[in-house]
Image (cartoon, rainbow, N blue to C red):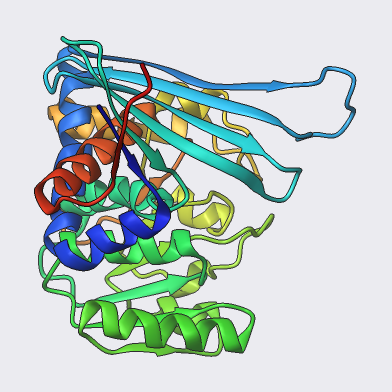
Amino acid sequence: MTLLLSQTDVDAIVAQTRPQIYGQLIARVRAGYDELAAGSADLHPRIYLRSRQDPRRRPPGLFTMSALLGGEGRMGTRLLALGGPAHGGDALLILFDQQSSKCLAIINDQAVHSMRSGAPAGVATELLARRDAKTIGVVGSSSIAAGGLIMTFYARPSVRSVRVFSPTKEHRERFAATMSAELGIPVTAVESAGDAVREADIIVTATDADRPVVPDADVAPGTHCNCLSRNELEPATYERGRIFVSSTELHKSHDPPFSPPLPHEAVFGDLIDLVAGTVPGRTSASDLTVYAASGPLATWDVATASVVYENAVALNIGKEISLW
């Protein structure tokens, strides 16, 4: 039997298991990087299938990503139908057991997207942020910004306050109220990106900006930055930081690219290197460290689907269906 998990099901799972599920997601995504470092995992990057006759940069089409985690014994695929250049359509996570080749679950991807995208930032925070971090500055108020903040906070429970900026006052105030209730600490909406990041120990950015929005002058030495998009930081900030990406291979072919481009030689390594310990991360309290998301890895999808599936089974949530 295959477990079918709708958005309502996933919301119920999160409501009944938070905050433990956040720690599980960070741990399992990190374990996926362990497997990549050890060679027991395999994956392929995004494949974008669309009409070659459509001249638009991102016409309607289908994204697919797959990974196998041999140590965990799970494999899976993410399917995302693009509805146009600005937004996606329906999306699914399909999880399989490697040994039996049985389909374990079909999961609504939109319901887990923010957690899955935020979990690597949690891994980066564990590996790069100062352990005495007290303040997070957030730029952006999207669901990805929420996922990035949640995972960053649970990776550094020493944090005591958050400031958030988003250009639309209503959006940033709603985000602040929602995240205050979620995290149990004060989250304050502020008037500018500078106000959000100034004197922050950790910065989280997740916007659709096509140009830098975080003033370099307001990013202090010793800060750790989780950039879930790519263009929010000024070149000067990247130039003085120790930069790590989600994958050096994906960074070479990132779509859309960093603007201005982030030279390959400016990147110290990726999360695989950090987890494996082959590249040093933070070397002093004054280091400015940057995790720049260079594109999603399908191992994140399999790890996330596994956590959601296991919690669904434990809670008896979801609908069992027979496909054969």
Among the 4 quarters of the image, the one containing residue 72: top left
Q: Is residue 60 visible?
A: yes
Count of picture labels: 0
Q: Please, is residue 168 above or below residue 234 in the view?
A: below
Residue closer to the observer: 243 or 60: 60
The vertical placement of 100 against 257, above or below, is above
Residue 90: x %, y % from top left:
58, 43
The spot of residue 117 in percent (x, y) is 39, 48
Report whether 111 appears left or right of 11. Answer: right
Question: In this orientation, does residue 127 appear?
Answer: no
> Whole-percent x and y of residue 244?
35, 39
Q: Is 264 rendered above or below residue 12?
A: above
User: Where does residue 199 sit, x and y in percent of width and height?
Assistant: 33, 79
Q: Quadrant of the C terminus?
A: top left
Apparent side of residue 129 relative to residue 180 in the rendered image (left or right): left
Residue lying at 25% horizontally and 16% vertically, measured from the top left: 102
Q: Is residue 107 above or below residue 202?
A: above
Q: Front-most of 193 and 91?
A: 91
Describe residue 242's horizontal placement relative to residue 101 as left or right.
Answer: right
- When asked about the image quadrant of residue 164, the answer is bottom left
Residue situated in front as seen by the camera: 199 or 205: 205
Question: Looking at the figure, which quarter contains the N terminus?
Answer: top left
Residue drawn at 50 percent across, 66 percent down:
216
Residue 263's quadrant in the figure?
top right
